[in-house]
Image (spheres, rainbow, N blue to C red):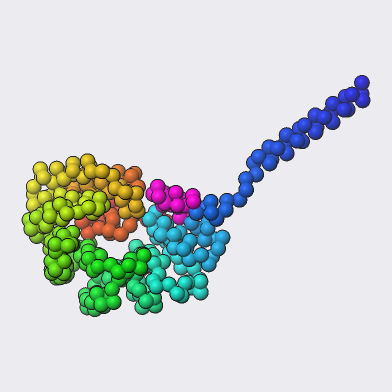
Amino acid sequence: MIRYFFILLIMCCFIACNTSAKETTAKITPPTTTKDLHQLATTARKKGAWLKAAQLYEEIYQQDRSNEQANYETGTNYLKANYPHKALAILTSFDKKYQDKAAEFNGRIARIAKAHYQLKQYPTILQLVEEYNYPKMYRGLAREHLKALIQLKRPDLLAQHFTNYQKIRIYDDKGKSTNMGFLYRAICNELLLTNQLELLGIYANQYSNWATKRVPKDKRNTAFSAFYQQNYLQAIDQIKAAIAAEKSARHLMELEGLLGVCYAKNKDLGKAIAQIQTIQTMDDLPPRHDAFGAKFYHQARIEIALKQTDNAITSLTKGLANKAEFWSNRFKEDGLMRDLFEENDFKILVKYRD
């Protein structure tokens, strides 16, 4: 009897140990590969989950500190998530010896400039441009450069460097030459943002002269230049002409929004509100980084022009819930939102998260 008892005890122990081993094995998961991380990061980025995307890209970068693309993506997504300090720390941790010396341009440096801009470290941006030695000037860096000069109130250098960019040209993230409308819009917005209205008038007129030469091919820049000239009655006609010719959903929504701002500036309440309704019934924009929450963003711009501060902040809050981002020409970097800057609710909305 004792013998059978011991046999039973041994069998129970064996079964228990075997079960425990299986449970332990089930809990062990293989390490996430770089390929898996890339897929997860890409999915998060496409969904507008900027912080999650940044953290996943950072994990890739930490596995290989020579990976400049991973460093770029990490910094970019931290910026989108409104973490400029974290973005700058990551971007500047990259060892320059790993930079692609054969590349025609470098967009990562533009992200460093963006982080410095958000942190109001404008002189550092000038130094970055001075040290940039790639054959093609990346347009994002050129934009941050001119914005920094405006913030530093250096109209002499602004004119000098803008003229130079017109000569050497600027290039997008595919290395393709981009027209000067990109920089004209950045300059005009920044001058509006900083309330340098006299200088805004000068550049808006230059912008208009430049854009007029491109008509009828380029009605959109003609509309933007008329808007920044702040002749809103004239701008209405130009914007309507641009809307009739526009094929891009993103640009169309922006133009419809500007039309609403013009109506509001001209005290035409009914038409301004009608533009809000038009925007809200438009088809959703394609899933690209500057499209999320755009309907509420453009609605807020019109509401600000109508002096409806509370409504505008509510719309911006909805925009964030729909994945709007703190990125170029948005929220605290948007000259059309100056009237909200001193509002406490707005300050809370745009406060840096690090």
> In which quadrant of the rendered image does the C terminus lie?
bottom left
Q: Is residue 47 magenta?
A: yes
From the viewer's side, name the closer residue of 262 and 37.
Answer: 37
| Residue 61 sits above or below residue 148 on the image | above
Q: Quadrant of the N terminus?
A: top right
Is residue 325 visible to us here? no
Nearest the viewer among 132 and 113 is 132
- The single residue placed furthest to the front in the displayed view is 217
Q: Which percent across, then down, holds residue 261? A: 15, 52
Please tell me how many numbered marks the rendered image carries.
0
Q: Is residue 134 visible?
A: yes
Q: Nearer the viewer, residue 340 or 271?
A: 271
> Residue drawn at (13%, 66%), measured in percent from left and top?
212
Please report the bounds of the magenta region as a residue range: 39-55
Task: Give the left or right position of residue 37, taking residue 343 as reference.
Answer: right
Q: Is 270 above or below relative to 63?
A: above
Residue at horizontal 45%, vertical 52%? 42
Confirm whether the magenta stretch covers residue 50.
Answer: yes
- Residue 308 x, y percent position in the rendering: 18, 46
Near-viewer residue (2 or 105): 105
Residue at image position (12%, 53%) is 240
Magenta highlight: main SS:
helix
153 horizontally vs 22: left or right:
left
Residue 327's quadrant in the figure?
bottom left
Position of 353 with respect to 299 (left or right) is right
Image quadrant where residue 245 sits: bottom left
Question: On screen, 154 above or below 82?
Answer: below
Q: Is residue 147 above or below residue 252?
A: below
Residue 322, given in percent of the width and then of the height, sits at 33, 44
Q: Position of residue 263 (x, y in %)?
A: 11, 50
